[in-house]
Image (cartoon, helix red, strand yellow):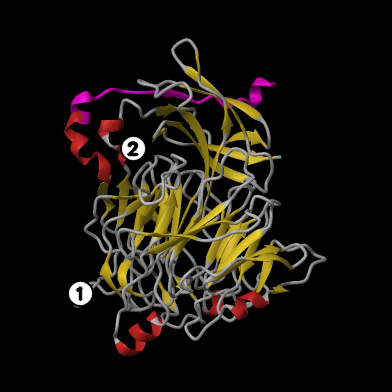
Amino acid sequence: MNPSTLLLIFLSLSHNLAAAAAAASHLAGGQWNIIEPSIGVSAMHMQLLHNDRVIIFDRTDFGRSNLSLPAGGCRDDPNDIALKHDCTAHSVEYDVAGNSFRPLKVLTDPWCSSGTVAEDGRLIQTGGFNDGDRTVRVFQPCGDGGCDWVEKPAELAVRRWYATSQILPDGRAIIVGGRRQYNYEFYPKYSTSPSFFSLPFLLQTSDPEENNLYPFLHLNVDGNLFIFSNNRAILLDYKSNKILRSYPSIPGSHPRNYPSSASSVLLPLNPSATEAQVLICGGAPKGSYVQASRNGTFLKALSTCGRIKITDPSPAWEMEEMPAARVMGDMILLPTGFDVLIINGAGAGTAGWELGREPVLGPIIYRPEMPAGSRFVVQSESVVPRLYHSSALLLRDGRVLVGGSNPHVRYEFAGVQYPTELSLEAFSPEYLLPAASKYRPEIEWDGREGFEVRYGEEFGVRFRVGELKGMGGVRVTMVAPAFATHSFSMNQRLIVLKSGAAMKGEGYYEVRVEAPATGKVAPPGFYMVFVVNEWVPSEGVWVHLGS
């Protein structure tokens, strides 16, 4: 094999036994830290890019934010319904390594929009409200801090407000649904294809509360698209616009999409990538939106999770009870390959202005490989309520970035039950606490933003570690950075790579792994690769996967 195709990750470990002992009593619950008291903008949408910057943005149609644009950089939008001349920012770029941020200029309104990251690393952000509902916004990452949004008006075929996007095996994005949009389209488009395709399933799953918004999209391992809307799902061959199968309704038949706002993940894919399972947790029962908005009655959120093997010939839902009810939660695949973090949200009410109550401050971890009845682990609580319009995503260092929460039409900081939240927090799972330090690697690499890895290619991973938990206890995981908004992380995906046992070398170990076989398993683009020593992951390293 050509040595240039090898990915060699060198890992070292520093010991701090005193700190480990001091932290041992806190190991099981993780740890919270406020990392920015205010970024001036509420984090309704977030996307991590391969230069370790997080693009964050809110609406533009509520008036001024708490962050000024650079002098002379005011946005003038004659179509804006709140402020036609606005000298404040509604988007920021957060630098994870420097723990700093700078304002970005978004012109048209990206309220309740969607996004994907293209194969070349650009953020492709689609739709929104008002004059932004057919806009495509592109953000090209750069190292000098001089990049900003580039907007392409009327690029989309129809209005896309509350739509969902998913990256496909060929690198394009599919954009599904939106308010009163019972169809889908691609971006970029093929010149010979229709501008959009009808999808009556979205109309069939609508109801008086419109619980078919932000449908859950998951790319199946056969390349077809799993679409969950309201309380049921289909498998769509999007190339021929043909429904291949319909899945049973989730037991209880309660809605799970916006505004009932459960969350969903495609569970980690095993090395063979022949099976795929979807998990959906929480939400609000039927009628919650009407009861809250018209009557001021805030129904208890749902406490159930449904899990289904979407590749099974006779799929059936397996239902489980969470330790607490939760609506508007976020689900994050942690790099261990067997942990799902459920974070943010409320215990009563529903998504919408002023409609959430009883903040759920404590996250939980769901472990799908454990026996039923022992899969949930309660974590330490935050002190900051994260309700409507909050978000969360995984960082390359293994922390989970949490931001947002604005249940008001405008920014409100006083005289309200749940003030607008402009801070950023980091939740550190137990694997980042000092008690795990002797198992946790510290990656040493040259800082490049993406080693090239080809589909099906074998490559070597070298690492150093203080204490290896068995030669066969090492796994390597590959995680796609997600676009997080409205309780769903679009394009979130974790693949446990096929690997052999770790081999001991001169002062290091090496494990041989195999990249995903095709774009059906892992669409082309940038991924974070982690080495996991039993339950403790290394810091990730960016790789670029392609043909």
Q: Residue drawn 45% across and 62% down? A: 263
Residue 189 image-quadrant placement = bottom right
Instruction: Find residue 48 and report its horizontal and vertical position in percent.
Output: 47, 50
Q: Report the quarter where the C terminus lies.
A: top right
Q: Label 1: how many residues lie within 10 Å, few (<14), some (14-19) or many (20+)?
A: few
As drawn, is 184 to the left or to the right of 61? right
Provide the secondary structure element on which disc 2 rests: helix
Instruction: Find residue 320 and report its horizontal and vertical position in percent.
Output: 41, 59
As drawn, is 227 to the left or to the right of 83? right
Kindly identify which residue carries mark 1.
Answer: 414
N-terminal of the pair, mark 1 or mark 2, is: 1
In the image, residue 383 above or below residue 6 = below
Give the residues in magenta. Answer: 1-20
Q: Label 2: how many residues lie within 10 Å, few (<14), some (14-19) or many (20+)?
A: many
Residue 67 image-quadrant placement = bottom left
- Residue 431's label in the rendered image is 2
Q: Residue drawn 56% across and 41% down? A: 270
